[in-house]
Amino acid sequence: MASTKADDSRVYQLKITLKGSKPPIWRRIQVRGNTTLAKLHGIIQTAMGWTDSHLHQFTIEGVSYGIPDPEGDLELKSERRVKLGQLVARRKARFRYEYDFGDSWDHDIEVEQILPPEPGVRYPVCLAGKLACPPEDCGGIWGYVEFLEAIGNPEHEEHEAMLEWVGGAFAPEAFDLVAVNRLLQQR
């Protein structure tokens, strides 16, 4: 399971897909192997468009990583010291990222490639993505489907309330790669 020290400098190309979303909501990012899971959490939040308002965890080969809470119910290993390259050493490996335990936004993460770093590229970087991230606190994937039905139908009884709740408008097809990369470069 553990990788060599050389893997820390390699670049991991990850495809992050929000489970249950149809059509799929996804992002393709590249991060260095020496990225801690704590930093990867922040990168995923930025790339997907979440606001980091809830708890999260990674599950890799049956072990859960996150922010340990000695008084909490979850047994999590600390994400702060463990690096991606230490836990995931092969192409096509998959692991899970869950955000917001109430809404349970499950993400499937696949290691598409492990590459040497490109000269002049500042990591992390988002290469591509599709569709807007669901709004926070909309009730998970099922709540998001209901939300889209409501805002997409002016005759729906919740149409006005949902538009007001989301701030007046929501474009489910929107994904701004340039804006995501601008935010990632601030990390």
Image: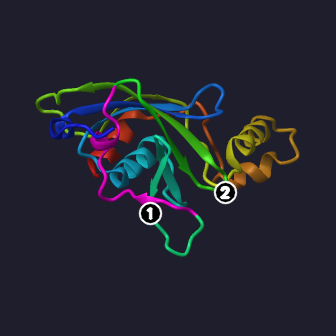
Q: Which residue is mark 2?
A: 102
To which residue does mark 1 refer?
67
Give the extent of the magenta segment: 74-90
Q: Residue at x 36, y 47 (%)?
A: 40
**Which element type, helix, strand or loop, lies under badge 1?**
loop
Q: Is residue 1 left or right of residue 147?
A: left
Q: Is residue 133 visible?
A: no
User: Percent x, y for residue 92?
Assistant: 40, 24
Residue visible at 70% across and 55% down in the picture: 165
Q: Which residue is the extreme one toward the front?
A: 1
Estimate the spatial distance between the alpha carbons at disc 1 and disc 2, rounded to whole Å.
17 Å
* Residue 149 falls left or right of residue 115: right
Q: Is residue 49 above or below residue 94?
A: below
Residue 110 shown left or right of residue 122 in the figure: right
Residue at the spot 25% in from the left edge and 40% down from the top edge: 33
The residue lying furthest to the left in this view is 119
| Most frequent secondary structure within the magenta stretch | loop
159 or 140: nearer the viewer: 140
Q: Amino acid at mark 1?
A: Ile
Would you identify the image quadrant in which residue 7 lies? top left
Q: Are marks 1 and 2 in contact (CB under 8 Å)?
A: no
